[in-house]
Image (cartoon, grey):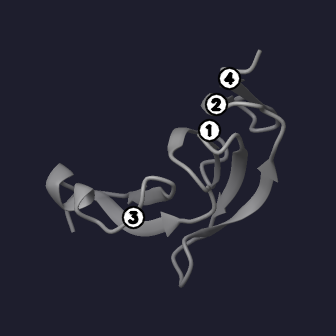
Amino acid sequence: SRFNRRSFANRPCAASFLRVITMAESLQYRGCLQGHRNWVTSIATTYEQSNLVVSASRDKTLMIWELTPEGETIGYARRSLCGHGEAVASTVLSSDGQFALSGSWDK
């Protein structure tokens, strides 16, 4: 099915989940990744490892996700990273996917 903003916005997926869309000839909604306990504020991936996604959240954590090829599940959480004392506002991955940086309102 073709991607349009209205059908995407109406999908049942709370703000603390990640919506996963695959790009082929058109965008396709695949489902939600569940794990954060608050709003997701940022996501990052790399061209070289597009199956690896890092998400930041207001729950003060980063989560590393691995997306799976077409199948029953869209992906799974590989790891949850803790350490921030406030909500994590942003995240970015190095081009090789080996390092993640995160930004928070910590003091």
> Which badge, 2 or 4, comes first in the chain's sequence?
2
Give the side of residue 41 with respect to residue 94, left or right: left
Of tags 3 and 2, which is closer to the observer? 3
Pointers 2 and 4 in contact (C-beta within 8 Å) = yes
State the CA–CA distance, disc 1 to disc 4.
Answer: 18 Å
Kindly give the residue lying farthest to the top in the view shown. Answer: 107
The three-letter amino acid code for the residue at tag 2 is Thr
Which quadrant, please, contains the C terminus?
top right
Estimate the spatial distance between the alpha carbons at disc 1 and disc 3, rounded to whole Å.
Answer: 24 Å
Seen at 62% across and 55% down, the residue is 51
Q: Residues within 10 Å of mark 1 (few under 14, many from 20)?
A: some
Find residue 91 and name its label. 2
Write down the residue under mark 1: 46
* Residue matched to label 4: 103
Q: Nearer the viewer, mark 1 or mark 3?
A: 3
Q: Which residue is mark 3?
A: 13
Q: Residues within 10 Å of mark 4 (few under 14, many from 20)?
A: some
